[in-house]
Image (cartoon, grey):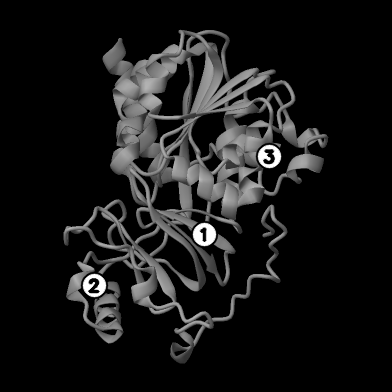
Amino acid sequence: MAGYNGVTSADLPVKRQREDELENENGVSASSVSVEMEHKKEPDCISSVIPGWFSEISPMWPGEAHSLKVEKMLFQGKSEYQNVMVFQSSTYGKVLVLDGVIQLTERDECAYQEMITHLPLCSIPDPKKVLVIGGGDGGVLREVSRHSSVKQIDICEIDQMVVDVSKQFFPAVAVGYEDPRVTLHIGDGVAFLKAVPEGTYDAVIVDSSDPIGPAQELFEKPFFMLVAKALRPGGVVCTQAESIWLHMDIIEEIVANCHQIFKGSVNYAWTTVPTYPRQTPFLFNPSHIFSWHMLLLSYNYACANGQSQFSGVIGFMLCSTEGPPVDFKHPVNRIDADKSHSKAKGPLKFYNSEIHSAAFCLPSFAKKVIDSKLSEATFKSI
């Protein structure tokens, strides 16, 4: 898969490294890329590095691990809200990490950015005003700007550092900021929505990180009520809604909340993103790990006793307000048929009308749970 900056599979070798190659050519070591611990307090998410390798650790997905080989550390910083890291990987291009959790990679970001944007915008005719909550990397802006009918694009991102880092290291993603229709608001998304006049937007896209830290409010019922108020009749919202393999309890709660609030259509869709979500099968305090050998032994033990599997799947909650009916499963505004946007933004890499409809076909185990929750919510509302 090629990235928007011209990264191709040929540029991203998949050769498995031997143990004696773990120390990479740039001399990246565990001490140089570990997230610094403040006051010796274990954070909710910890990123760890076996020399030359990045791995995630998070209570959001216990029992699993995914590691990427670090070719070069490009940026490390701490904003008012979170730790921010960028590194060059061997197989996925540049990688953006927030609080130890991968947010995007150059290789597979198209799958997420295109789907979270075009699933809602292609489901309504001629969207004109769009609000993006989160999405500081600019990828959703890039995709919204493909729609020629859109006249106004507002984005509210809480962390200026995410915006600045993305513009510096991911220009092909952050290209969306260059569109004159875009207005950036740095601040809290909840506070922004409280000030929005009722019925302002045709679509709201919530590109949030996981429901821990600064993004927690974006998964709660009061937030969805504010989104519904900000939408016109028949307006649509699409929000990141976790993985069916790992977070069915969270998804159930999101489905129940949305069904109570949005009186039009409520649907769940999903897509594949290889680097989403995955986790390390153990939580540890780096101060307790005295050597790479000990870390490797701990990792192997955890893999042997944990689930040791990956997800590679992320979901979306799509809802509409009461008004003109919205059939999310059948796109009416076909962006893939319009090639005029390709020159400035590059061609679509993932989204098309067929995959749009297919995204709503759920595996039996997920369909059973989600349909049951929708039926339960319907019964309670009668």
Q: How far apart are marks 3 and 1 (CA)?
A: 29 Å
Instruction: State yes or no: discs 3 and 1 in contact (Cβ < 8 Å).
Output: no
Q: Which of marks 2 and 1 is in front?
A: 1
Dot 1: element: strand
**Residue at the location (51% across, 42% down)?**
163
Point out which mark residue 308 bears: none
Q: How far apart are marks 2 and 1 (CA)?
A: 29 Å
The residue indicated by pointer 2 is 305
Residue type at mark 2 is Asn
Residue 299: x %, y % from top left: 29, 76
The residue indicated by pointer 3 is 354
The residue indicated by pointer 1 is 95
**Residue at the location (19% across, 71% down)?**
287
Residue 285: x %, y % from top left: 20, 67
In this image, 210 relative to 269: left or right?
A: left
| Dot 1 crowding, Cα within 10 Å, few <14, some 14–19, many 20+ | many
